[in-house]
Image (spheres, rainbow, N blue to C red):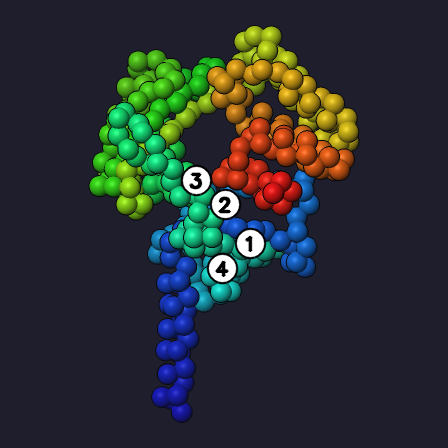
Amino acid sequence: MKQIFTMFLLLIFSFAKTQQSKLQGSWIVESIKYNNGNPLEINHPLYSTFIEYEFNGNNLEINNQKFKAAIDNSTISTNFRKLNYQFESNFLVINEKGDDKIYYLLKIDDFIKKYPEFEPREIVYNNKNIFESNLVIEPSFNNVENFEDFIRNNIPSYSSTSAKNEFFQAKYILTKENKITDIQIEKSISKTFDNQFKTALLKSEQFLTNTSGKDLLVTHTFNFFKMFAGLTNKEEKQICNFIQKGNLFYEKNKFEDAITHYEKLLAMNIHPSTKDRFGYSLDQAFINLGVSYLVMKNTSKACEAFHKVGDQTNFKVRDYLLNFCK
């Protein structure tokens, strides 16, 4: 009897280890549904979004937020969250305790097989044939800090610069041998800040891993744009005004009124640098406009608004385009 019990415990232990082993690596959320199987509402913040879970031993990283986790054969527990999980075919299915939603995730390789548009695009950069990284195929960063925090904390002038109205953009190549080359500052803040960024970036090299087997072009930005204090000209003031008024009605589900204000953005020939500076706010305004058009049964105009943000490789609008704009 004792031997049977011991074997039973070993089987349970072996099963738990197998489950934990299957979790290892990166997973991309393909879809989110309510527990009853219903889809999310089109104006739900999670309707179209990027979420990545990365498991490394007992370490869990969700969209660059790191957690220590205790993992058994059916649950993932951190100090703040308890996730129930199971495997269904190629999917990892997660439901957080107390949440009414179920998340369906695919391993990165399976995700790319199903959606080959996320294969890195080959381009010529500095007379070299390389591949552009994206949210699905990008370097991993193996440090207690996430990459963004590491770079920020290793730029001495970051705090003083963040109080200003600035936009910074740099590109670099991370080779398949994990070496950083061809650093190029495309939108400078100052020589001091730029040089400190380069130093921090090269310092990060020891923690970066490129598993794609390709030389990857990576873009990094810092947007210190102050929405109100940072308005520098008439165009920016108009954009801010249209966004604010549109948001006011959108948040009250007054979609027709929201359209009236968001539509004014479509009539503007917004300079690319201004688009960069407004970033998230402008993208969200176009998404809200698209959702408002959908509510008003104007699918064609909704698709035009979503395409202002990006194509099917842009997770902010990906599910809207897949579900309404084929």
| Residue marked by disc 2 | 51
Q: Please, is residue 139 above or below residue 185 in the view?
A: below
| Residue marked by disc 3 | 135
Helix, strand or loop for disc 1: strand
Foreground mark, 2 or 4, reads 4
Q: Are marks 1 and 2 in contact (CB under 8 Å)?
A: yes
| Residue marked by disc 1 | 103
Distance between the Cα atoms at labels 2 and 4? Answer: 14 Å
Q: Nearer the viewer, residue 122 or 47?
A: 122
Left or right? Give the position of 147 relative to 311. Answer: left
Foreground mark, 2 or 3, reads 3
Label 1 crowding class (10 Å Cα cut-off): few <14, some 14-19, many 20+? Answer: many
Kindly identify the residue that appears in the image at 70 percent across and 37 percent down.
299
On the image, the x and y values in percent for residue 14 come to 37, 73
Residue type, label 4: Phe
Distance between the Cα atoms at labels 2 and 3? Answer: 10 Å
Kindly identify the residue that appears in the image at 41 percent across and 38 percent down.
134
On the image, which quarter does residue 147 sit in? top left
Distance between the Cα atoms at labels 1 and 4? Answer: 9 Å
Tell me, for residue 91, which label it has, or none: 4
Which quadrant does the N terminus fall into?
bottom left
Residue type, label 2: Ile
Residue type, label 3: Leu
Helix, strand or loop for disc 3: loop
